[in-house]
């Protein structure tokens, strides 16, 4: 019979963080006025283990300086052009036809004053024409040569190579067209017109992140009873020292989560009215320009086959890493375990070195099917104080995983003025010869060694100004409910 995890006792979401120094910050749960003194442990017990969630960007990205309020880069467009919304009024079995290109990539030419070059198809090129929506179960493709192009009207005239002309087995009278070559007569002039490279220009803006820890000079004289430690190895007996280090660790986490969750302020929003602009975080960018899996986790090879088919239509990156939550990790483990021929009737010893005399390994770190996929747990998606605590009733707002392509991509760097290799994910921080805003920290006040203010306290300030660049977002996948 299956059991369940009870709601109480549960997990504490705020074990120590306080907005201001209060009496509850002090570790004073020991009453030494009693006749029986308690036995006390000198060191604080780390019941939540490593509480930080940052490491994702350090694993998959890099950091590099920038000296502008705006970061821009160009990404290559497709080498070949395919139009998927082309219509014609030609009758079946006609030898020639006129097609109108209605794709969104080709705007209203009269409205924007486009002339030559508005259509990538030119006179003399040979094209393949296929019906978009079939009337019957089988459609027929046609091949033709372009005899005229009207860029103002957005039309092309073609002559079919088939004697029977177009086979109009098409319910919606919509066709797809792509270029596969060209043909010219002897002694004729060359190709008319030329094509310009198609680049997509993207941009993002850095945001300023700040934090502060403050403690009064009087409170700094209070000695704690328990030795404390933090994830970065700092130890001591003063309670404010622990809180300062936790503030620093919390700020380090925010430097990463802000790059993951940042969102640009929409026109007319309250943030814009208040003077804020936001930025393009990884999740926002992948949802906007990348690939989205919705409707639950992919739990079968057929689901991954659909993912692979989409990746084939993108950059076809050979190696990919999936950063996922626990449930998604279980789903992949179960999917791969089911491929074992003995999986339905029991465990197959020996597979993956699962010897009967050793601990059984029921987890997988990766697999290959078309591409190499590696998986790793992402603490940010499991942490109950972060996305791991979001309710599943949020539906498509619940992120279960992120597929990140491994390696780097070539882009045109506006600052360098040349093509440069960049990781798909990297952080740009504001810096110059005199100011480095990657990670600034300074102390003000008149306590704790600071002597630059008449404030009877010590204030530790943290600041960073940064943005994340998600290049080649079409190669990313975000997995949502």
Image: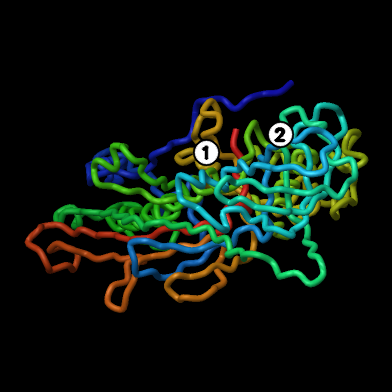
Task: Select label 1 or label 2 by which is in front.
Answer: 2
Whether 271 is drawn above or below 230: the answer is: above
Nearer the observer, 267 or 83: 83
Residue 296 shows in the view = yes
How packed mark 1 is, by other alpha carbons closer than 10 Å (few <14, some 14-19, many 20 or more), is: some
Say which quadrant the C terminus sits in. Answer: top right
Instruction: Give left or right: position of 458 versus 474.
Output: left
What residue do we see at 52% from left, 38% from top?
A: 388
Percent of width and height locating residue 465: 34, 60
- For the N terminus, the quadrant is top right
Residue that mark 1 sits on: 388
Dot label at residue 89: 2
Relative side of 87 to 252, left or right: right
Query: Which residue is depicted at the point 39% across and 48% down?
Result: 40
Query: Does 80 sit left or right of 252 as displayed?
Result: right
Image coordinates for residue 440, horizontal then vertical, percent = 30, 66
Q: Residue at x 25, y 40 (%)?
A: 273
Q: Is residue 359 visible?
A: no
Calculate the distance from the C-alpha at mark 1 to the C-alpha at mark 2. 56 Å
Cβ atoms under marks 1 and 2 closer than 8 Å:
no
The residue positioned farthest toward the bottom in the image shown: 433
Q: Quadrant of residue 122?
A: bottom right
Q: Is residue 285 above or below residue 172?
A: below
Measured from the top left, where is residue 251 in percent x and y?
36, 54
Q: Earlier in the sequence, mark 1 or mark 2?
A: 2
The dot on residue 130 is none
Looking at the rendered structure, the secondary structure element under dot 1 is: helix
Task: Name the element at disc 2.
Answer: loop
């Amino acid at each position: 019979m299956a059991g369940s995890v009870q709601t109480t006792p549960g997990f504490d979401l705020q074990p120590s963080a306080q907005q201001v120094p209060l009496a509850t910050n002090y570790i004073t749960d020991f009453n030494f006025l009693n006749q029986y003194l308690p036995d006390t442990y000198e060191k604080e017990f780390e019941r939540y283990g490593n509480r930080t969630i940052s490491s994702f960007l350090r694993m998959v990205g890099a950091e590099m300086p920038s000296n502008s309020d705006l970061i821009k880069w160009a990404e290559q467009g497709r080498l070949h052009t395919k139009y998927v919304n082309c219509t014609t009024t030609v009758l079946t079995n006609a030898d020639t036809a006129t097609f109108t290109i209605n794709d969104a990539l080709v705007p209203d030419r009269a409205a924007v004053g486009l002339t030559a070059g508005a259509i990538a198809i030119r006179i003399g090129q040979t094209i393949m024409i296929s019906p978009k929506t079939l009337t019957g179960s089988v459609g027929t493709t046609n091949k033709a040569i372009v005899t005229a192009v009207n860029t103002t009207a957005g039309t092309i005239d073609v002559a079919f190579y088939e004697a029977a002309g177009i086979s109009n087995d098409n319910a919606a009278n919509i066709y797809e067209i792509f270029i596969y070559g060209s043909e010219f007569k002897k002694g004729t002039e060359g190709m008319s017109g030329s094509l310009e490279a198609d680049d997509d220009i993207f941009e993002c803006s850095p945001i300023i992140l700040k934090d502060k820890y403050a403690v009064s000079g009087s409170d700094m004289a209070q000695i704690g009873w328990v030795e404390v430690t933090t994830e970065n190895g700092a130890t001591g007996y003063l309670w404010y020292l622990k809180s300062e280090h936790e503030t620093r660790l919390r700020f380090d986490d925010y430097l990463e989560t802000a790059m993951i969750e940042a969102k640009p302020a929409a026109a007319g929003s309250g943030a814009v009215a208040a003077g804020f602009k936001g930025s393009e975080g990884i999740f926002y960018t992948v949802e906007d320009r990348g690939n989205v899996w919705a409707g639950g986790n992919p739990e079968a090879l057929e689901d991954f086959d659909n993912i692979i088919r989409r990746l084939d239509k993108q950059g076809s990156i050979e190696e990919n890493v999936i950063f996922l939550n626990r449930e998604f990790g279980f789903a992949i483990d179960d999917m791969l375990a089911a491929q074992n021929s003995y999986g339905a009737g029991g465990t197959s010893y020996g597979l993956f070195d699962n010897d009967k005399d050793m601990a059984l390994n029921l987890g997988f770190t990766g697999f290959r099917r078309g591409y190499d996929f590696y998986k790793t747990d992402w603490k940010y998606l499991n942490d109950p104080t972060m996305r791991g605590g979001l309710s599943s009733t949020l539906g498509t707002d619940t992120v279960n995983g992120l597929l990140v392509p491994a390696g780097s991509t070539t882009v045109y760097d506006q600052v360098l003025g040349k093509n440069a290799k960049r990781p798909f994910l990297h952080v740009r921080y504001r810096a110059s010869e005199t100011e480095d805003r990657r990670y600034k920290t300074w102390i003000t006040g008149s306590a704790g060694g600071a002597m630059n203010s008449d404030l009877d306290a010590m204030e530790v300030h943290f600041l960073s100004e940064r943005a994340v660049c998600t290049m080649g977002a079409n190669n990313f996948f975000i997995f949502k409910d």
